[in-house]
Amino acid sequence: PLPWSMNFDNITNINQLSSCWNRYSGIYVDSTSSATLSTTSSGWARSTTAFDGSSHVKVNLYGTSCKYWLVTPELNLTEDAELSFDYMLTAYNDSDAPETGSGLDDDRFVVLVTTDDSIWTPIAKWGSDTERDDYALASVTNTVSHANISLSAFTGQVVRLAFYGESTVSGTDNDLRIDNLMVAVPDTTTPVIPTPEDASIAASDILYWVGEGSNEVVLI
């Protein structure tokens, strides 16, 4: 059931993830939205090097054979939902700024959805190809960024989410890190700020609470 979340705080090793999670190796092929995947113990790993020491997961974008997938358990999207997560790019095994330059051109980070473990539909792509990718990987830094991605196209279906890191040339050596995964129905409630009856009282001095799922305001 939604919401679903994962912040990796309850693991000290990625092997402690439940058996419903999977790690795979295999190049993602954009033209066919497919990949030939094999189970692997390499690639994604647990870390506390960044995110202010918080437990999270990372993949090292380096070398000629980085083609690693981290795939979530099945999620039943009974409502229009949204995927959110935090991410950053750092130097290898460090929290310092990532290496930059042309060596980054082959590196990719892709978020995908599947309903059958066969066809993988990309919902967000970071890379260097402006025609293929949605965002520039070179713009990702060692400061935390936050992603919100709609899953409304998959409402009513059981899906799995995949986080894919790729490097095909030995250039830059960086870690792509993610944390605080959540799939939930986005909050569309608009807060209502009351106007104080006493003009001498600033609105900022009034504490209020907006009722969940409504515009109810309770003055405190």
Image (cartoon, rainbow, N blue to C red):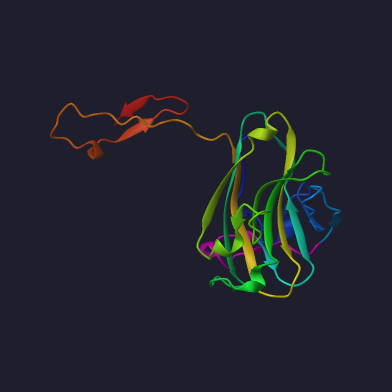
Residue shown at the point (50%, 63%) measured from the top left: 143
Q: Position of residue 14 (x, y in %)?
A: 71, 59
Left or right for 139, reference 92: left
Left or right for 126, reference 204: right
* Magenta segment includes 27: no
Q: Is residue 155 visible?
A: yes
Residue 150: quarter of image: top right
Q: Position of residue 25 (x, y in %)?
A: 81, 59
User: In the picture shown, does residue 145 fall above or below 94?
Assistant: above
Residue 153: quarter of image: top right
User: In the picture shown, does residue 89 fall above or below 75?
Assistant: below
Residue shown at the point (58%, 65%) measured from the top left: 138
Quadrant of the drawing holding the N terminus = top right
Query: How many numbered tags mark residues here?
Result: 0
User: In the picture shown, does residue 204 fall above or below 46?
Assistant: above
Q: Position of residue 220 (x, y in %)?
A: 29, 31
Q: Is residue 1 visible?
A: no
Q: Residue furthest front?
A: 131
Residue 217: quarter of image: top left
Q: Position of residue 45 (x, y in %)?
A: 70, 63
* Magenta segment includes 45: yes
Q: Where does the magenta region start and end?
A: 41-57
Residue shown at the point (78%, 71%) measured from the top left: 64
